[in-house]
């Protein structure tokens, strides 16, 4: 979130300089601009590229959770700044409020999503065989394994299928057709806790409240702040250290996986006498 806000802040600061330059000599000479159509036709590649610019800017606006009415206000500010019109508020003053506005909006969105997720988690806890732990994790074994159980420091090989409370798939090794492999101490807490309950060869369904998943930050754009998640997991193997492959981490499960140590340089050959 902070990176997106910083990016937007940079754009605003750049706009301050550009806007002041445009304003000098343009403000009195410019004729009134025509109203911007709400649904412009995208007939040329250039128009489509400019539309794509809008989509790119929109990604930096995610932390603000703007309503349709607020987006209209934003569009007015963008048009006034880009066209050198007289601003309705002093940009230098109000640009300082961006970070706080983003934090406030993200917290409000997280609280709303957490409230909406409560019935989803309650229904999960009522599933046959489901057990809710003190952390809030809801664990349901769907097939008992016969192998060993991993520890938090182990690297595991798994298949998984992750969905939001509305059933939307946000990440799935099943859909990719390739098992995932990662250290259990490098993933979100609900995974670290849940997979240790499993045995190799077993499957389980888990439900994760936001407090042990992605919290109030979420993992935009797919996972909202405060979102509860559901995973179907198959524990394929506990990977011995010598056979571990450490690919890039899976951002929808945990952090970046550790990178393998660089290969040792060969010792220099002895000089002949």
Image (tube, helix red, strand yellow):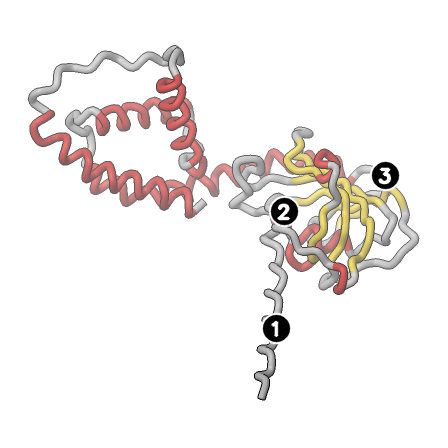
Q: Is residue 152 above or below residue 215?
A: below
Distance Cα–Cα, label 2 vs label 1: 33 Å
Left or right: where 243 falls relative to 18: right
Tell me where residue 70 appears, x and y as whole percent: 36, 26
Residue located 62% across and 55% down the image: 257
Query: According to the image, label 1 marks what residue?
Result: 266
Q: Identify the residue at image location x=55%, y=42%.
A: 219
N-term-proximal mark, 1 vs 3: 3
Q: Is disc 3 in contact with disc 2, using a CB cutoff of under 8 Å?
A: no
Q: What residue did someone put label 3 on?
A: 128
The quadrant of the picture occupied by the C terminus is bottom right
Residue ID at (72%, 51%) = 181
Give neighbour class at mark 3: few <14, some 14-19, many 20+ (Cα, 10 Å): few
Disc 2 residue crowd, few under 14, some 14–19, many 20+, Cα 10 Å: some
The mark lying in front, picked from 1 and 3, is 1
Residue 260 sits in quarter: bottom right
Identify the secondary structure beneath mark 3: loop
Q: Which residue is mark 2?
A: 250
Considering the numbered disc 2 on the image, is that residue within a helix, a strand or a loop?
Answer: loop
**Nearer to us in this view, 113 or 271:** 271
């Amino acid at each position: 979130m902070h990176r997106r806000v910083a990016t937007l802040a940079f754009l605003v600061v750049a706009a301050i300089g550009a806007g002041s330059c445009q304003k000098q000599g343009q403000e009195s000479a410019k004729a009134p601009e025509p109203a911007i159509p709400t649904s412009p036709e995208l007939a040329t590649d250039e128009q489509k590229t400019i539309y794509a610019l809008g989509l790119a800017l929109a990604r930096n606006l995610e932390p603000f959770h703007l309503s349709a009415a607020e987006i209209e206000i934003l569009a007015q500010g963008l048009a006034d700044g880009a066209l050198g019109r007289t601003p309705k508020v002093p940009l230098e003053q109000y640009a300082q409020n961006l970070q706080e506005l983003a934090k406030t909006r993200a917290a409000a969105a997280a609280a709303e999503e957490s409230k909406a997720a409560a019935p989803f988690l309650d229904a999960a806890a009522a599933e046959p065989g489901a057990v809710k732990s003190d952390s809030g994790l809801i664990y349901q074994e769907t097939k008992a394994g016969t192998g060993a159980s991993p520890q938090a420091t182990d690297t595991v090989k798994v298949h998984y299928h992750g969905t939001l409370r509305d059933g939307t798939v946000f990440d799935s090794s099943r859909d990719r057709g390739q098992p995932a492999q990662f250290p259990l101490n490098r993933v979100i807490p609900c995974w670290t806790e849940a997979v240790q309950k499993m045995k190799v060869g077993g499957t389980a369904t888990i439900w994760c409240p936001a407090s042990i998943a992605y919290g109030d930050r979420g993992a935009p754009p797919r996972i909202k702040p405060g979102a509860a998640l559901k995973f179907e997991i198959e524990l394929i193997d506990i990977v011995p250290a010598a056979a571990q492959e450490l690919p890039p981490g899976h951002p929808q499960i945990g952090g970046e996986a550790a990178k393998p140590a660089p290969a040792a340089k060969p010792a220099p050959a002895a000089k002949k006498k």
